[in-house]
Amino acid sequence: MSDKTKRPVGQEAIDEKGWWLAHKFLVLRRVSQAFFLGLFLLGPWFGIWWVKGNLSGSLTFDILPLTDPFIFVQTLFALHWPETTAIIGALIVGVTYALIGGRVYCSWVCPINPVTDGAHWLHDKLGLQKGWQPKRSTRFWVMGMVLVVSAVTGTIAWEVVNPISMLHRGLIFGMGFAWTFVLAVFLFDLFVSRRGWCGHLCPVGAFYGLLGTRSVVRVSAVKRSECDDCMDCFAVCPEMHVITPALRGTDADTPIILSADCTNCGRCVDVCAPDVFKFTTRFDDTLAPARTERKKPKHQSEASRAA
């Protein structure tokens, strides 16, 4: 491993590509999250009702219905038949995320993502241990439990504690009890489990991951042979286990990240100075020679410890 690994995460990319290209997808994600949140706040704050509702269910320009598919499924488990507009809305949202990647919702739309990213940033700055790391399958058990509770109680169970909805209510009605759920997520990721909420517990992320299992939009390590082992991609990836099969596979292995856990956040594209990664489709058959065999590093960098 070269001396580059001793530098701060992303510094090599900044030096090689400039600040903007080393942060492009991070900035675009924040703009996207602010845009969607702003659309829902235009009505309550300014009386401009282009969009009525929230991320659970909404109506845009009194024409376009959009429904969270996870809410829709809970409704069915609760033995309530949704309105036609809710069914249409769920189909629109479901098909969209099935094509572009289910967990694109997590990294490009969900307003809790900046909260957990902020907790991760502070966690690293404070040099805290990664803490409790439940199995990633735990979120699927949580999702299953939510559906069971919905079936037993006849309610949309997750909305009682959903921090996404709580954040919306807090922004509309002011600081109150709803914010305790958002604060709990922040403190959990900061002190209890690094990237624990989105990566291990959130049932919404679990559901959208299943929805995007066969999605078209993907990230590919197409130039993996040029990887310099800086480990920055692992340090910034919220689901770092998805990188290894694509980046460190053999010539016969696809360089495309096919795991449904990938959020398509684009941070690996940002921080990679040799531009190993790029956005593509799952049908991309571009040849990607495997990396040459490396010697095991003697010292761990900040980035490698994060991985």
Image (cartoon, rainbow, N blue to C red):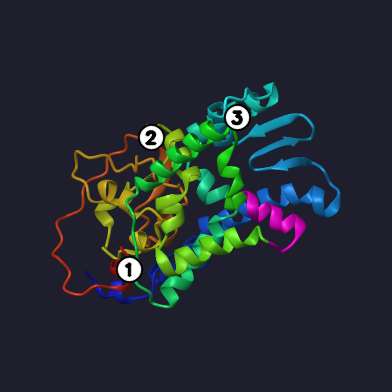
- 18, above or below 52, in the image: below
Q: Residues within 10 Å of mark 1 (few under 14, many from 20)?
A: many
Locate residue 146, reporting x and y percent: 49, 40
Tell me the residue that label 3 is attached to.
Answer: 90
Q: How many marks?
A: 3
Residue 29 lies in the magenta-colored region: no
Q: Nearer the viewer, residue 157 or 261?
A: 157
Apparent side of residue 275 relative to residue 37 in the rendered image (left or right): left
Tell me the residue that label 1 is attached to.
Answer: 303
User: Which secondary structure dominates the residues rendered in magenta?
Assistant: helix
Q: From which residue to which does the magenta span run?
A: 165-176
Look at discs 3 and 2 and give the one toward the viewer.
Answer: 3
Is residue 183 in view? yes
Q: Measure the C-alpha gap from mark 3 to mark 1.
A: 40 Å
Locate residue 156, reporting x and y percent: 59, 37
Secondary structure state at the residue bearing disc 2? loop
Locate residue 180, reporting x and y percent: 60, 62
| Picture disc at residue 282 | 2
Apparent side of residue 139 relative to residue 64 in the rendered image (left or right): left
Q: Amino acid at mark 2?
A: Arg
Q: Measure the C-alpha gap from mark 2 to mark 1.
A: 28 Å
Q: Earlier in the sequence, mark 2 or mark 1?
A: 2
In the image, what residue occupies the spot 47% across and 64% down? 188
Q: Residues within 10 Å of mark 3 (few under 14, many from 20)?
A: many
Apparent side of residue 170 relative to residue 90 in the rendered image (left or right): right
In the image, what residue occupies the spot 34% across and 53% down? 276
